[in-house]
Image (cartoon, grey):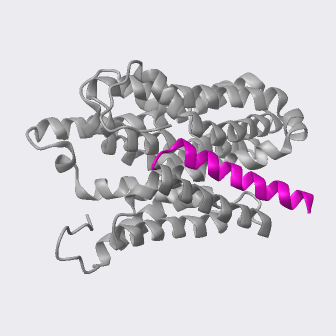
Amino acid sequence: MSLQATSTLARPWLTGMREAIPLLGGYVPVAVSFGLIAVQSGFGPWEATLISLLIYAGASQFLFVGMVAGGAPLWLVVAMTLLINVRHVVYAPNLAPMLGQSRRWPWLMHGLTDQVFAVALHRLPQLPEAQRPGWFTGAAGLAWVSWVAGTLLGAVAGDWLVSRWPLLGQVLPFALPALFLALLAPRFTSRRWSLALAVSIGVAMLCTLAGHANLGIPVAAACGALCFYAVRVPTPRQGGDDE
Amino acid sequence: MSSALWLAVLASALGTLLLRVVPLLWMQRRLARLHGKDGVEAMPRWLVLLGPMMIAAVLGVSLVPRDPDALAWAATAIGVLATLLVWRRTRSLGWPVAAGVAAYGVVVVLAGLG
C-alpha cells in the first residue's frame, strides 16, 4: 500500500479497509486461538464470539476466560480485565487533534485497539479532515470484523484448522511486529528518539520474557518516555532534530 | 453462561469502552478551550511522547516469539531485517510487512526441511 501525503480518496472507507489488511495477519490467528481456548474453557461458540464483539481487547479476553475457568471471583475478573485495558486511555487523546467534530467519533472509539491506533496515528494526518471518519470506519471495522469472525472460526473449527495448516498459524503472527516496525521506523529521527524507542522496545521484550507482557506495555512506554527526558544528547547546531 | 457471568462480560465491555471514549471527550474539551492553538500544541507534551512509546512497547511485546527457541529468534531477526530493508527502499507499510512475513516464513520452512 502506498501512502501519499494529504491524498484525497474517492472512497476513504475502502482505503481504510485496504490499509488495515496487514493487521489481519496478526488478528486472525490470535482470534482463532482465543475462540479455541474459550471453548476449551467451557464457553459456547456464540458466547466466545459475543465476548469478542463486546469487549474487543485481545489480551484481556484471554485473561477473562482463563480467570473464569479457574474459578476466580467475577469482580476480580472484571477488575483485572479493565486493568489490562487501562493502556488505552492514552490512545484517543493522541488522535483527538486530527479527528474533527464528527459525532461518530465517540462510537468509533470501540474499534481503537493498539494496532488500529498505531496505523491511525500514522495515516490520519495524511488525509483531509472530512475523509478521516470514513477511513477510520473502514480500517477499524475490518479489524473488528476479522477479530469477531476469527473467534467464531476458532470456536467452531479451531482444532481442525491448527492441525491442517500449522505453518500458517506459525508464520502469520509475524505480520504484527513487522507492521509496528514499519510504523515506528520513521520515528527514529534522532539519537534521542532512537534511544528512547529502543529502551521502550527492550523493556517490553524483557517484561514479556518474564511473563508480564500486559504489565510490560505501560511500564516499557513509561521507561522510554523517562529516557527521553533524562538523556540529553548534544544536538547539532542546525536543524535541531531531537524533538 | 449464568446471569452473573453475563453481567461480568457487560461490565468489562462497558468499562473498556469508557477507557477508550472518556479520554477522547476530555481531549476534545481541552482542544475547544485552547482554540487558536493547533492540535499538537494543545496536547500535553508527555502525551505526544507517550503515543510512539506505546507503539514501541507493543512492538517489543510482539517481537518475542510464542515459543522463544533459537529457530524462532533467528526467524524473528531475519524477518525484522527484511522488514527494515524493504521499508528503507519503499517507505510504505504494505511491502515491508509482506517481506517480513515472507522472510520469517522462509526461515521456518528451511529449518523444517533441515
Residue situated furthest top in the rendering: A10
Horizontal and vertical percent position of residue A123: 39, 39
**Looking at this view, is A178 or B23 the one in front?**
A178
Task: Decide: is A148 above or below A118.
Answer: above
Horizontal and vertical percent position of residue B22: 34, 36
For the C terminus of chain B, give its image quadrant. Answer: bottom right
Horizontal and vertical percent position of residue B3: 65, 24
**Taking the image as drawn, is residue A110 in sight?**
yes
Q: Is residue A140 left or right of residue B26?
A: right
Tell whether position B108 is magenta. Answer: yes
Horizontal and vertical percent position of residue B34: 11, 41
Task: Find the magenta span and give its range.
Answer: B91-114
Where, by quadrant of the figure, is residue A238 drawn? bottom left
Identify the residue shown where x is 70% and y is 40%: A65
Tell whether position A237 is magenta. Answer: no
**Looking at this view, is A145 or A8 the one in front?**
A8
Q: Is residue A156 left or right of residue B113?
A: left
Where, by quadrant of the figure, is residue A156 drawn? top right
